[in-house]
Image (cartoon, rainbow, N blue to C red):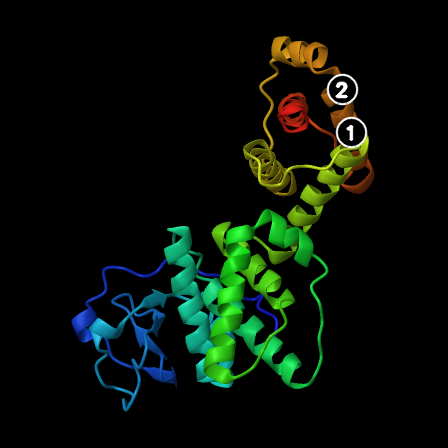
Amino acid sequence: MSLGLFFWKSPFRGCQTSEMKIEKILNNNVVLTLNESNQETVVMGRGIAFQKKVGQDIETDKIEKTFIPEGQEVLENLANLYRDIDPDILEIATNVIKYAQGVLRLKLSNHIYLTLPDHLSYAISRTKEGLDIRNPLTWEIKRFYKVEYEIGLKAISLVKDEMSILLPDSEAASIALHIVNARQDNSDLGVTIRMTELVQDILNIVHFYYGMTFDEDSFQYTRFITHLQYFARRLLHQERRESNDDFLYDQIQKKYQKAFKCTERINDYLLNVENTSLTKDEQLYLAIHIQRVTTED
């Protein structure tokens, strides 16, 4: 099932929760209700519909998440998804999301409550059928998104403990991408994947230009990766700015000549694969980071 049809608003607020009634039961943990504006609203919580019937009050102390799907078609697709997925998978996905938010200390976008259960369901089905489809970006994801990858390993562990199914370690990388995507305010997963590829390609250009291997545990390397991730995100989302600081640009070009030449290689790559070129700001800050990561002791 494609999830491209889903669009999520912020969790609803201001509803008179004491009057919330169950309009439809999707499973033991998910129901539909109407808010004070008469909008159909998804309400999630462990056991929130257990031994309940349509028309009964929702126990507010069991509510963990609420959100409003946009459009009837979206609502129907949502209902089908939550009705068809194994409740154990939904519970595992919810626990992974809670764990991720605790580790990352932030709230993830609402769409993760759909994309992650859907992905886990598909991954478990493939594993049961003996199909081992590896994520080609596993190595890159382990390097660039270490925390999210560890969350992915936690998800694999939960699936093993709760369902006695051992997912391949590469699934941790795929789960990590969903977490990364949910951190970026509902960005398209394809953009997240392309970001990862861009970062790796730029690292390769620097690696081969200097003929050196990076110390991946160093502070400057971590800073460089973070800079590349934000750069790739801005480039793909077309959120680029130009300060036109010609003085600083000229100073960096003179001071860090080799690093600046390396950015020209990066610029050639971007022209070839993305049909775009570096701005002066992007070029000078890339040069600064390249200089730091290639000269640290």
Q: Is residue 203 above or below residue 249?
A: below
Q: Nearer the viewer, mark 1 or mark 2?
A: 1
Look at mark 2 in the image and give the residue it sits on: 258
Q: Say which label, 1 or 2, has the lower sequence index.
A: 1
Which residue appears at 21% of the width and 77% of the height? 59
Tell me the quarter of the image containing the C terminus. Answer: top right
Q: Is residue 156 above or below residue 182?
A: below
Q: What number of labels is visible?
A: 2
- Could you tell whether 71 is left or right of 45 in the image? right
Q: Nearer the viewer, residue 35 or 200?
A: 200
The circle on residue 273 is none
Rendering quarter of residue 275:
top right
Which residue appears at 62% of the width and 49% of the height? 143
Work out how far the residue at label 1 is from the one at label 2, CA to CA, in angstroms.
9 Å
SS at mark 2? helix
**Tags 1 and 2 in contact by the CB under 8 Å rule?**
yes
Q: Nearer the viewer, residue 246 or 2?
A: 246
Query: Extreme left residue here?
Result: 18
- Could you tell whether 288 is left or right of 43 in the image? right
Residue 246: where, in percent of width, then height? Answer: 64, 11
Look at mark 1 in the image and give the residue it sits on: 210
Q: Nearer the viewer, residue 152 or 217?
A: 217
Residue 264: where, in percent of width, then height? Answer: 78, 25
Which residue appears at 70% of the width and 16% of the height? 256
The residue type indicated by label 2 comes to Lys
The residue type indicated by label 1 comes to Tyr
Residue 79 seen in render: no
Residue 245 seen in render: yes
Q: Residues within 10 Å of mark 2 (few under 14, many from 20)?
A: some
Q: Is residue 40 above or below residue 145?
A: below
Residue 69: where, in percent of width, then height? Answer: 43, 67
Q: Nearer the viewer, residue 158 or 93?
A: 158
